[in-house]
Structure formats: C-alpha cells, structure tokens
Amino acid sequence: MQEQPPSFSEPDAPAAPAAPLNKAQPTWTYFLSPAALVLGSLIISATIWWTRSDSTDKQAADEVPVIGAVSTVEATPPASGAPMGLKDTLYSYAKQVGLDQAKFDQCVNDQQSLSIINQGLQAGTGLGVTGTPTFFINNKKLVGAQPIAILNEIIKAELNGSPSSIDGYSEAVRRLAATNPPSFSIVDTKPDITGAPIEGNANAKVMVAEFSDFQCPFCKQWTESSLRQLRAELGNDVALAFLHFPILQIHPNAGNAAVISVCAQQQGKFWEMHDLLFAKQDEWAKLK
C-alpha cells in the first residue's frame, strides 16, 4: 500500500474575487453564497433561507431583501419518492437531533449565524490556517488528520510542562516539523475560542482547538478514527474546541452545514449535530 504523505489537510483555498449575489437566483439558493477573499479576509456574504412576503412587501422583483427583515421559510417535504435536496436534508437533521423548529428557523435567518462562521475563517486566516483539519494544542500547531498517537504525544507534553523547542518531541513529531510547509510548529498565539463549542472544561490546562470543515473528507476521517479516543481524555485537564473554517471554493455545501451547526449550538446540541453531519457527509455533501 502506498505510504500516505505526512499531512492530510485540504489544499489551500484559491483566492477569488467577491461574488455578488445574483438577483435572478431562486430565493432559497441565497442560503449561503460562495466564500470570497475580501481585503485579504475570508468572508461569507449571504442571505439565508429567505422568502418574500409579497402581501406586505412591495419590493421590485429584482431586489434582494435584507436579513432580519424577512420571514422564515420551512423546508417542504419532497413529493413521495422524490429525493430530498440539500435544504430539506439539513432541516431533517435539525429535527433528528431534536431542535426547536421555530428557534431553528429564526437562527438560520439571522446574520449573526454567518458572523460566527466568518469569525472562525478570519481567526484561522490570521493564524496561518490554510487547510483542514488544523489543530492548535495550546500554542502547538498540528496540520492534517494525523494519527491520534501524535496528538496524544503533544497533549501529554503540554500537561508535563509545554516544550519550547522542537527537540522536546519524538522523531515522528520532528519529521512533521521538517516538512515544507511544516505540519507541526510552535507558534506565538493561541486561537481565541470565545463562544466556540467546547467539550471538556473550558479552563482546561490543555485546549485542543480544531479548525474544521464539515464537508472536508479528511476532517471526517479524523472524526471517525481519532475523536472517540480523544473524547476519552476530555475533562478537567484536556478540552476540545471547534472553530469553523469551511473552504467553500472546494466544499460548496460546507457553509450550509456550518450554519445549522451554529443553530444547533444555540440550543445546546452542537456536538450531536457535529457528529451527525460527519456521519452523514456522503449523504448531503453533493446535494443542491
């Protein structure tokens, strides 16, 4: 079997000009527009699941309503035997994890939901994140779906004093540090995890901050192969934070998934939605 490369992260997201909303586009497809590089920052600009209220709002046919000033729209079950599209499928996940439908509808139509995702994108970009998954174990940056043994070694080292030199690690970790670009490095700044969903104690000695993309196959690989083992270690000393980094240029549905996870977090169900989205990735990733 061919040896896998040392880093399994997704390739860099290509730079792209800001994409204006197509005013002739069908209404619900404004759910989330493609990501764009705006003044050097990744920004998601969108209208989410909106519908016009023609009886009260006499907008011209080519106008785009403003988020927060429009009514919500519920997913409509497809005709018997017809396959579900992306929107209906994601709405079905909200029901599956037990979200309150009215609160969910309000959340997906709220600009703040997009702002949370943008914050993750901007924070990751500022920290040099170019692919997913990327982990920060305190101030130790680990790129790619690396074996759990590598992550465990770095966590243990943090618990035992936090090495300030690459020499404090095994040969396997030093090899990752020697790749170009490095898959392991010691950095100056820890990610800001304010508002992020966290498993374990938010004040844990070791915080594993994961920048991830729900449509990324390597993020799914890591979740299925390593997360269960990491969860066994989470508690007062070690915790896990999730930070959004959907690379929409190659994963066009990742932003949609990120939005519903934000809305699940609002109702205390982030990790249930997190696990479901990765488990069902093959089901929703290619839908429209």
Image: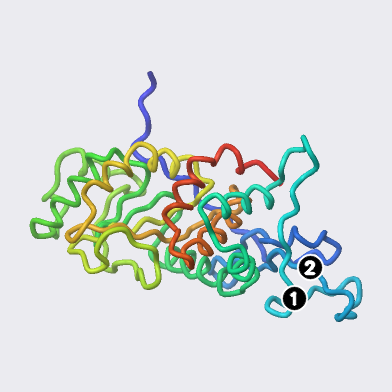
Residues at discs 2 and 1 in contact (Cβ within 8 Å):
yes
Q: What residue is drawn where x is 31% and y is 42%?
A: 228
The percent coordinates of residue 274 (x first, y second) are: 46, 51
Q: What residue is drawn where x is 35% and y is 36%?
A: 225
Q: Name above or below for residue 172 compared with residue 239.
A: above
The percent coordinates of residue 109 (x first, y second) are: 65, 70
Counting other residues with Cα less than 10 Å from the Cα at mark 2, is it few (<14), some (14-19), or many (20 or more)?
some
Number of numbered markers: 2
Counting other residues with Cα less than 10 Å from the Cα at mark 1, is it few (<14), some (14-19), or many (20 or more)?
some
Residue at mark 2: 51
Residue at mark 1: 70
Q: Identify which amino acid the numbered label 2 is placed on.
A: Thr
Q: What residue is drawn where x is 57% and y is 61%?
A: 259
Judge left or right: residue 119 versus residue 178: right
Pick whichever, 83 or 180, lies toward us. 83
Q: What residue is drawn where x is 68% and y is 78%?
A: 68
Pick whichever, 70 or 217, lies toward us. 70
Q: Identify which amino acid the numbered label 1 is placed on.
A: Val
The percent coordinates of residue 247 (x first, y second) are: 54, 54
Q: Name above or below for residue 281 compared with residue 102.
A: above
Within the image, what quadrant is residue 111 found in? bottom right
In the image, farthest residue toward the left: 160
Secondary element under disc 1, as helix, strand or loop, is loop
Judge left or right: residue 90 versus residue 174: right
Secondary element under disc 2, as helix, strand or loop, is strand
Q: Say which label, 2 or 1, has the lower sequence index.
A: 2
In the image, farthest residue toward the top: 1
Q: Give me the C-alpha separation between circle 2 and circle 1.
A: 7 Å
Q: Name above or below for residue 151 compared with residue 104.
A: above
Q: Name above or below for residue 40 compared with residue 174.
A: below
